[in-house]
Image (cartoon, rainbow, N blue to C red):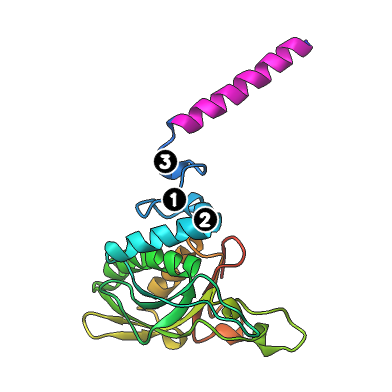
């Protein structure tokens, strides 16, 4: 009986190994991330486990493919030291209200989110191209909610971006503050926030608390908390 159980276990393990071997690379969590991997939990998992070198190489490739435009930035010391950060200038054809400092994972995750989800969802649900993203910043050397007894915010390591509004090619400008409750724009904004779960560790919006009433907080901590 014990021999049969052992044999069954070995067969299951062998089947699992063979199954992973024949999985498409984007479904296999052990195959390195590519810029073509579709959104989903496997892609999010791969983003979380990227080494600094692998992230840097993918970011270079993303620049070459015009998914993002970044500028190198030197490491800095101080109360909130920064390492492996870049300055993001744009997401290809999608401009920014201003450039922002981002860790490599934040920059790469944002580039994938904008091109794989934000742009298609905007075209599908709003009937116009996404042309510009407005934000409130990314880096700020502070604790969570500015509380002296709280832990450091994701912003202290440039691991979060606060998006406040979107502009479309047809001239329409939609703020998170007003658009979240409006009939025509609410489904689109809610779809965008939901889609962020496939890239960021957390995506917080107006339904999370009053502090996020006017923006989406897209950060790298955690594993898919979006609300």
Nearest the camera: 184 or 176? 176
**Mark 2 or mark 3, which is nearer the start of the sequence?**
3
Q: Decide: marks 3, 2 in contact (CB < 8 A)?
A: no
Query: Sequence-wise, which precedes: disc 3 or disc 1?
Result: 3
Residue 17 visible here: yes
Mark 3 element type: helix
Residue drawn where x is 78% and y is 10% of the image = 1
Q: Residue 211 or 146: which is nearer the viewer?
A: 146
Q: Which region is colored magenta?
A: 2-21
Q: CA distance from mark 3 to mark 2?
A: 16 Å
Image quadrant where one finds the C terminus: bottom right
Q: What SS does tag 2 mark?
A: loop
Tell me which label, 2 or 1, sits earlier in the chain: 1
Q: Is residue 151 left or right of residue 123?
A: right
Residue drawn at x 56%, y 77% as measured from the top left: 82
Circle 2 Cα neighbour tier, 10 Å, few/some/many (<14 / 14–19 / ≥20): some
Determine which residue is flagged by label 3: 25
Alpha carbon separation for disc pair 3 and 1: 8 Å
Residue 50: give its label: 2
């Amino acid at each position: 009986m014990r021999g049969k159980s052992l044999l069954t276990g070995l067969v299951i393990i062998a089947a699992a190994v063979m199954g992973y071997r024949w999985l498409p690379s984007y479904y296999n969590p052990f195959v390195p991330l590519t810029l073509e991997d579709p959104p989903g939990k496997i892609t999010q998992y791969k983003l979380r486990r990227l080494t600094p070198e692998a992230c840097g190489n993918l970011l270079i490739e993303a620049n070459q493919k015009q998914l993002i435009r970044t500028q190198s930035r030197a490491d800095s010391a101080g109360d909130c030291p920064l390492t492996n950060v870049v300055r993001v200038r744009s997401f290809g054809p999608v401009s920014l209200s201003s450039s922002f400092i981002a860790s490599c994972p934040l920059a790469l995750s944002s580039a994938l989110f904008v091109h794989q989800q934000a742009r298609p969802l905007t075209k599908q649900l709003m009937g116009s191209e996404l042309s510009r993203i407005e934000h409130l910043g990314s880096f700020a050397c502070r604790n969570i909610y500015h509380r002296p007894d709280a832990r450091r915010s994701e912003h202290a390591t440039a691991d979060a971006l606060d998006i406040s509004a979107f502009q479309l090619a047809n001239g329409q400008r939609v703020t998170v503050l007003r658009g979240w409750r409006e009939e025509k724009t609410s489904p689109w904004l809610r779809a965008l926030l939901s889609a962020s779960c496939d890239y960021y560790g957390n995506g917080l919006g107006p339904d999370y608390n009053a502090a996020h009433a006017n923006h989406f907080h897209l950060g790298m901590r955690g594993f898919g908390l979006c609300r």
